[in-house]
Amino acid sequence: MTIQQVLLLLLLWMWLPHPCHTEMLFKRTPDLRPKRSGGRASGNDGKAIHRQKRGWMWNQFFLLEEYTGSDYQYVGKLHSDQDKGDGSLKYILSGDGAGTLFIIDEKTGDIHATRRIDREEKAFYTLRAQAINRRTLRPVEPESEFVIKIHDINDNEPTFPEEIYTASVPEMSVVGTSVVQVTATDADDPSYGNSARVIYSILQGQPYFSVEPETGIIRTALPNMNRENREQYQVVIQAKDMGGQMGGLSGTTTVNITLTDVNDNPPRFAQSTIHLRIPESSPVGTAIGSVKATDADTGKNAEVEYRIIDGDGTDMFDIVTQKDTQEGIITVRKPLDYEMRRLYTLKVEAENTHVDPRFYYLGPFKDTTIVKISVEDVDEPPVFSRSSYLFEVHEDIELGTIIGTVMARDPDSASSLIRFSLDRHTDLDRIFNIHSGNGSIYTSKPLDREISQWHNLSVIAAEINNPKDTTRVPVYVRILDVNDNAPQFAVFYDTFVCENARAGQLIQTISAVDKDDPLGGQKFFFSLAAVNPNFTVQDNEDNTARILTRRNGFSRHEISTYLLPVVISDNDYPIQSSTGTLTIRVCACDSRGNMQSCNAEAFLLPAGLSTGALVAILLCIIILLVIVVLFAALKRQRKKEPLILSKEDIRDNIVSYNDEGGGEEDTQAFDIGTLRNPAAVEDKKLRRDIIPETLFVPRRTPSAPDNTDVRDFINQRLKEHDTDPSAPPYDSLATYAYEGNDSIAESLSSLESGTTEGDQNYDYLREWGPRFNKLAEMYGGGESDKDTS
């Protein structure tokens, strides 16, 4: 027999369940000395009990898990040296699972397991056994502890923590590149046999990937795997216990592997030549079109930068890379002119912005294309010779003087005639006009620099053949100054002189202003219009002058006010001058020259209220007026209170109906004859209960015969009045004299009872039922009483 066969038989024997026949023997020894390591306790009689040394024992039992037999599984046997086989001893078991999972035969000491045990739930159980005297219940042996270990069998397959794994690896990776590691666990005992030894293998995913049997690391197995050819792979990994041998249990998991992109593809233009068109009137910055180079890569590896590297239009066009679409947008850089150039050629290059040095050998990572741009002719608007015009003119020019001329031309080959006009929104006062044929601008109203120094005009040029196509140009007109305004006093001067003033005393300093603006600046001269015996003017030669007294003492009682004419002139050409009059009051002053009073009657005026008091009184009056107005408005808008203020406040409304009419003898009551004979109504008889706004002539209707039914008659009259446009809407008729036809009891009214000649028999009332019994007794009893009497 070979060694392999021996090992196979041994392995098969280990798999088969075997009962344990280990016995634990308890034996007393004559050595009663207590051991230092032994426990010590007191018995019921107060004497010390010492742990005695045993001769020998087995302190472990072994039990196979997952027992499938129908009987209790035998564990082992306990036996004491004191057991004579006469049944005087009793074996007791305590500890983990005692009495439930493990039971012991009290007489023989045999231990059995009551149910199947799973080692993965618990690997061992600690129990205690003791033999006692069945009669005295005293222990004949000290309590002994032992362990039942559960032997493992291969009853758990390897499991992965995840059913599906997700991993990625860069494309073009070398063989053996690690992708991901998967690990399976086996709940069996790793220290006993090969039940928990797991070996990994690949069931699906070859030949692209492989797995290491011991570690579970998945690696690439093929070189240069290209994402552009295939991006997703599904790999199935198997984990098998028993070292992968036959008969082992296994579990599987799925790994989804994605090839991530690397920059291994250059951009490529789909066309070698691209044609674009653009109208010549397109403004600068207009997008002409786009070019795009495709890249099989993704993300940043597909990012492309565009640029113009050659061509005859490099200064006329620009190209901008659109990041979101990865397109190159070609735009106009300078104005185009069909008459000057009609075709441009550009060489555009597209290059990857992120190049991986590992793949330089696959390059170059750029591509070029030719872009031809055709300029299309359009009917362009007129073009002015300048972008703006500036004209200067003096304000004193005559009407109709030409201040300047604007020039424009038609850039098209047709060279149409140009018509000029002024935008009147920029010349609301119509001060200027323009010659429509030659663009000459002339004045139509006088100019005044002091009113407006600048005029900003807008001139419109349009082709005669196409008036809708126009161009505008700004024209700035500056009005130059002419000395046409005389200087005047800068402010109004309130001048006074003290009664005790002396000769040569300064009473006022004056200055002047001029609306003109000469090139050399303002220069004013001050003088008196005539020699004045009281005052004189002294020019300071700085555009100011001083007013001085020429004599001593003034009297306000004699002359209270002096008028002093002052001549102010400028030095521009032509010289302009004006005369301003100073009003000088004579006032009483103190010794320091401070004015006290200027009126002769000032001392007679009573002391009045102060300004603050007047303001306070005025505010009080305004507040009172506002209060009165608000009170009147609130009183006008106040609504009446409702009769019932709330749901709880419910009051009774009593309506009296105490008018019962006049009976049969009332000849003023309603007469049905009038209803039957409308002709009896007076033609112009009006209602007395209301006053109609307009008198209508009543429409004559034919009278109804006497045998006409009242209901039909009323319906007929109602229909006539509904269709009558002259019938007033306020008239209404309510009739309560009709009770209907075919009444079994006919009329129950007693109004006509006096007109019958014979007695009536009311016995038929008894036939109508119990509801009419009372009425039958009243009428029937009356007749009986009458007969009796």
Image: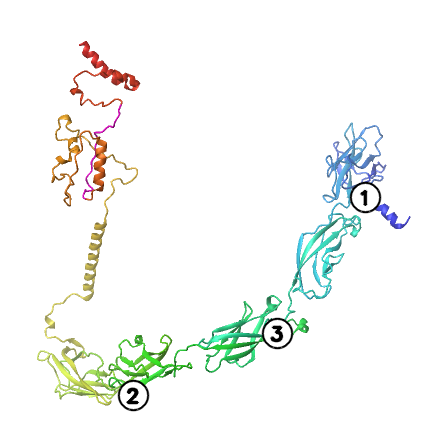
**Please, is residue 438 above or below residue 231 in the view?**
below
Residue 735 in magenta stretch? yes
Label 1 to label 2: alpha-carbon separation: 126 Å
Determine which of the numbered discs, if any, sits on residue 685 in the image.
none
- The tally of labels here is 3
Rendering coords of residue 271 (x, y %): 59, 72
Visible in this render: residue 120? yes
Residue 740, picture quadrant: top left
Decide which of 298, 488 is in the foreground and name it.
298
Q: Residue furthest left?
A: 558
Left or right for 608, reference 58: left
Determine which of the numbered discs, if any, sits on residue 519 in the image.
2
Residue 504 in magenta stretch? no
Magenta part of the chain: 726-743
Rendering coords of residue 293 (x, y %): 58, 71
Label 3 to label 1: alpha-carbon separation: 70 Å
Determine which of the numbered discs, if any, sits on residue 15 in the image.
1
| Tags 2 and 3 touching, CB below 8 Å | no
Rendering coords of residue 173 (x, y %): 70, 66
Determine which of the numbered discs, if any, sits on residue 366 in the image.
3
Left or right for 2, reference 429: right
**Please, is residue 100 above or below residue 314 in the view?**
above
